[in-house]
Amino acid sequence: MTISKLAQEIKESPTLTLNATAGRLREKGEPVIHLGAGEPKSKVPLDAILAAAAKLTTADIRYTPTEGIPSLIKAVIKYTADNYQRMVGPKNVIISNGAKHAIYNLMVTLVDPKDEVIILAPYWVSYPEIVKMVYGVPVIVDPEPGSFLPKMENIAKAVTPRTKVIMVNSPNNPSGAIYPEGLIAEIVQFCEKKGIYLMMDDIYHKLTFDKQTTVSCYKFAKDNVESSKLIVINGVSKMYAMTGFRIGWTIANEKIIEAMINVQAQNTSCSSVVLQEAAAGALKGVQSGVENLRLTLENNRNIMVNELRSFSGVKIIPPDGTFYCLPDFSAYNNDSLALSKFLLEKALVVTVPGKEFGLEGHLRLSYCGSVKEITEGIARIKWALDPKSPSEIFVGDKRYRRDWK
């Protein structure tokens, strides 16, 4: 059997791999704690469930227009007006099978072989792989030392005649950092000046803490919608805890959307009509669940940060939003993959290696689980790593002894 060179070069998703490993251990009865997942525990909004159920009861479940059903497109237009202060039309919107699918379709639409795409580290693990899958070249810009933020001058230095797109994710997965308004303004204005596409991945933009908010990228754009190279990606997965519904969307100029419709028509045809109705229900329904989730995450963030600060060797920048923090564990082991495997083997705690996000020596930890999972998971990590912690710990009903240095 011959596998394509491209397929061989695409990395496994580390989060999905870890999920599978954790699942196998749980099937054996092991008390695994998962601090790697990006799925909130809160229930899907009732309005989404009712909208999906209403569609199902019609027994009329068919294909939809490739760009999405009119009711969901209208809801996305209203959402954009309310949250971005930007009026767009139906021809500026396409609905896809999640934000990841939207990003992939966008890269197919914009990137030719050997075109360069600038990715700001730390970055979501799928960004470089998606760029490679369309035969583009990912160009990584590192953050300033001791920070999760890049300098504009370093972004500018990374630009070449082959640069086609800059990808920005704020609030950021994996760090939880919110890019300051001034930096967003600089990036938007720089891209307009250079004629570079700017993709804003705003999937976490409602999940922010400490009374911080994200700024609308459109605030700094001078181009109108139809000449703009500014693209916004969003979806229902995170803010509505609807990860399994796989509905995302893209806002862009008509020419980009028209091309994306052609691309999508040839790979998935359309998103499920039932799931689109659910997403429309969530966007049009009661919004209190979003704030409840945000408050829960903020509380969980505070607990995790406080627990991590009890380590003698961990450095942590408290996240401004999202589900994640990215503490620096390099004082214990700068090889984050080895460290992650060690913690799963010895402490039965799932973490995600920082190397996968472009920052070696760090681990991504998720705080979207329960408070018990957070406190017990961090306690196990501390027991496994910190020599000042007690040498024995109970994991489930078993007593474990730290017998390594």
Image: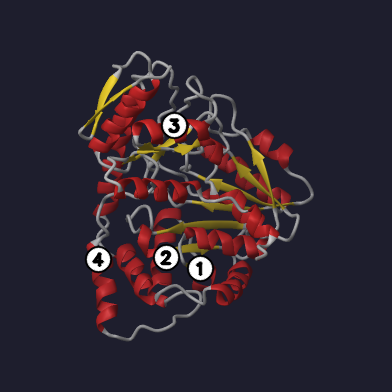
Sequence-wise first label, 2 or 1? 2
Q: Which residue is mark 4?
A: 47
User: Local crowd at mark 3 within 10 Å, few (<14), some, or many (≥20)?
Assistant: some
Q: Which residue is mark 3?
A: 342
Q: Residue 85: x, y in percent?
A: 45, 56
Q: Which mark is residue 76?
A: 2
Element under label 2? helix
Q: Which residue is mark 1?
A: 93
Are circles 2 and 1 on residues that touch, CB within 8 Å? yes
Are circles 3 and 4 on residues that touch, CB within 8 Å? no
User: Local crowd at mark 1 within 10 Å, few (<14), some, or many (≥20)?
Assistant: many
Q: Nearer the viewer, mark 1 or mark 3?
A: 3
Q: Residue at x 40, y 34 (%)?
A: 345
Q: Amino acid at mark 3?
A: Phe
Sequence-wise first label, 2 or 4? 4
From the image, which quarter does the N terminus lie in? bottom right
